[in-house]
Amino acid sequence: MTKPDFDEIIDRIGTHCSKWDDMDSAYGISPQDGIAMWVADMDFRPPASVQRAVEAMAAHGVYGYPGANRPYLDAICWWMENRHGWQIEPEWILTAHGLVNATAICVDALTEPGDAVVLMTPVYHGFARVIRAAGRSITEFPLTLRDGLYSMDWDDWATRLTGREKVMVLCSPHNPGGRVWTRAELAEVAAFCEKHDLVLISDEVHHDLVMPGAAAHVQTALATPELASRLITLTAATKTFNIAGAHIGNIIISDEALRDRIKQRMMALGISPGLFGLGMVAAAYSPEGAEWVDQLVPYLAGNRQIFDEGVNAIPGLRSMPLQATYLAWVDFSGTGMTADEFTARVKQSARIAANEGATFGTGGESFLRFNLATPRARVIEAVDRLQRAFGDLQ
């Protein structure tokens, strides 16, 4: 395999790219002089195996209805067993149009309007968006900061239940905090769901992107086998291999009765995978794809180190130690500024588009999220801009 060049600057402007082409309308920052660090995709090409698969499909030139998807299912099973020690069966896998869509399907199938869904906040904002759009409410379980990392507070959380909760969504590894939950923490989640009759949706889309030196990610299904009848695991190749445009993700359910509930709802909505996504995932979940990931993660770790050292040198700023994902979660509370004030400096002075913390729910108000999955030169430039934007604090 040819060594990937993650340092290559690839111009994505004008390619129907949300991250770069929508930056001006969303943030008032031109992509010509700004740095896009908001949308969670990478500015890297995927493994050559994926590119070859796309080129082969394009060369064939007929793009009819897809079928014969066993190679795709077998690739998912191979990846889960070889990369995560999790043996799954092809029939456990349902295919959605990405994991936001998968979350929406599960909420739709398992709850009714007026029911509530539990989120541990701050957490990925896509969850709240689809839950509220479906006419369900959100019961927030605010995460607690201990030694600079997020932790769970079950004593407090139990008092927040209203009796309307039917589902809990777990983000594992956590986005935006980058926590890798321990086996013991996952067991606590399982016990809580059993006690309060909740179905658990475990979104594990970042499970391949664990930083060197961090504890290994544990699949919720492996940590909590007793929860099988109420556990749905969401995974995808899209985040790992930067193929989010394929809009394809896995809903993995070992329990037949629970799986049938989701499958019936998907049939009612007419949901089926696209041709290109099936081929791209099968090509990504391969030995060549695995080698590519093994080179990607150290590169992301290097970006994290440069970013954290530079940001943490600014008085009042603190980047949360990142155990997984490529998303830095920076706390600006030490500056004494309001969210509007520090956000304005990042947007207007540094010309960086970063996600505003309040959109992630309770606990995110003093934070911004920065995407580090970009060539290192951009990370270095972003650090320099932030240091200059907050230069009066030095």
Image: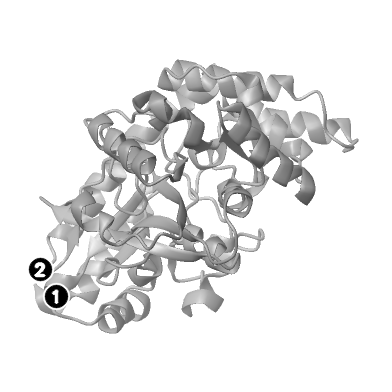
Distance (Cα) linking label 1 and label 2: 7 Å
Q: Residue 321: in sight, yes or no?
A: yes
Query: Could you classify mark 1 by the number of other residues whose Cα lies within 10 Å: few (under 14), some (14-19), or many (20 or more)?
Result: some
**Element type where label 2 sits in the image:** loop
Q: Quadrant of the C terminus?
A: bottom left
Q: Residue 335 carries which label?
A: 1
- Residue type, label 2: Pro
Q: Residue 153: in sight, yes or no?
A: no
Q: Residue 311 appears in which quarter of the rendering?
A: bottom left
Q: Where is residue 131 in the image (x, y as percent from the top left)?
A: 53, 62
Q: Where is residue 44 in the image (x, y as percent from the top left)?
A: 50, 44
Q: Where is residue 117 in the image (x, y as percent from the top left)?
A: 46, 57
Q: Is residue 21 above or below residue 102?
A: below
Of mark 1 and mark 2, the one earlier in the sequence is 2
Camera-nearest residue between 79 and 319: 79
Q: Are marks 1 and 2 in contact (CB under 8 Å)?
A: yes
